[in-house]
Amino acid sequence: MQDLMTQTIKITKVAQSKAREVDFHNIVMGTRFSDHMFICDYQNGEWQNPRIEPLAMIPTHPAAMALHYGQAIFEGMKATLGKDGTPLLFRPDENAKRMNFSANRMGMPFFPEDLFVEALKQFVAIEKEWIPTQDGSALYLRPFMYADEPFIGMRAATSFKFIVMASPAGPFFHKKIKLYAEKKYVRAVNGGTGEAKAAGNYAGAIRPTEHAKTKGYDQVLWLDAQHFDYIQEVGTMNIFFKIGGKFITPDLSGSILAGITRMSVIDILRDKGYEVTERPITLTEIIEASKNGTLEEAFGAGTAVGIARIEEIGNKDLSIKFPSENPVSDMIADTLEGIKTQEIEDKFGWLVAAK
Ligand SMILES: Cc1ncc(COP(=O)(O)O)c(C=O)c1O
């Protein structure tokens, strides 16, 4: 078997980029796609034919197993431009690792992590013109893998595609967010697939999220399936609270996605001298902290949204309001953004130049 890293990535470029047609000041996230895609096929037990080519439709057999049994996983990451105009990736090795964690849970083949990072670097260097430059904007990158084998029957597929595509993204939440503390539906249970970035997890979240939106909330706050009290996460974000000067975030208990923003925020907070504890957190204790005046700040943390300040957690029986000032959340948002654009020194060594 030929080592995949010794195969070069075959590159076919579009005749003319469409980047100049895009109004980068009015980007509707996820609606415009860049010129190319990276694509690689898994067949006969090996990944083959890594290539970058013009973004195009992919012929799909109606029996493709991902459509029926949901063997589909994905990642989300962002590319920004550094001070000298170099495209930068943020901790791509962590996305590569998490993709394989998800692949393992979903019975899918590992994708070589060094090829994952190399593919992203070459892809982003080609799509450089698509990286928006305004504050808080970035080129959103979507690596994903799915079972394309035509087969009806329940078993792991034997052929897959790994693809990376990109979509320019403006700042996600311009306003503070309200969370609906969901007490009927659940996102994940221990032993389930909540720790994996599996497409099906998001399918199950769509109806509850729509429901929360009709009630005037922005996102669902997911609680545990047994007590409906342990806080898990939010939409596509992990959650942090500041109570009595200290930070807490739910521990990775087996049903929460291990966010790369989450792990970066923990490092930044500790570096700034804050105490951060990862532990089970109940809604009851947040209500208590709100009543006794120790609840100071809360924010969601994720790649798509960055840092989203939380103004309220509620449902029909509940309304927890947060103070309007969020000084530490603001500092974290600025630090993360500053590192990604090289306004702030990358002392953790998180950036990878794509050139
Ligand atoms: C369910 C869920 N939780 C948390 C996150 C945050 O993860 P990250 O910081 O790696 O984007 C995401 C986004 O990927 C998500 O989909």
Image (cartoon, grey):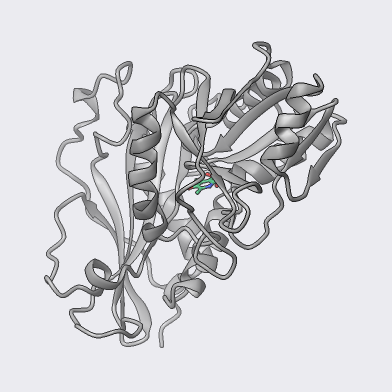
**In percent of the image, x 44 and y 23: which residue is there?**
171
Q: Residue 169 at what x, y percent from top left? A: 38, 30
The quadrant where residue 344 appears: top right
Q: Is residue 97 left or right of residue 162?
A: right
The quadrant where residue 71 appears: bottom left
Q: Is residue 276 left or right of residue 335?
A: right
Q: Nearer the viewer, residue 294 or 262?
A: 294
- Which quadrant would the N terminus be assigned to in this image? bottom left
Q: Residue 135 at what x, y percent from top left? A: 49, 18
> Is residue 15 shown above or below 93?
above
Q: Nearer the viewer, residue 34 or 28?
A: 28
Q: Residue 57 at what x, y percent from top left? A: 14, 55
- Furthest residue in direction top, as rendered: 324
Q: Is residue 225 left or right of residue 132?
A: right
Q: Residue 196 at what x, y percent from top left? A: 51, 62
**In percent of the image, x 76 and y 22: which residue is there?**
291
**In percent of the image, x 60 and y 47: which residue is there?**
260
**In percent of the image, x 24 and y 29: which residue is there?**
19
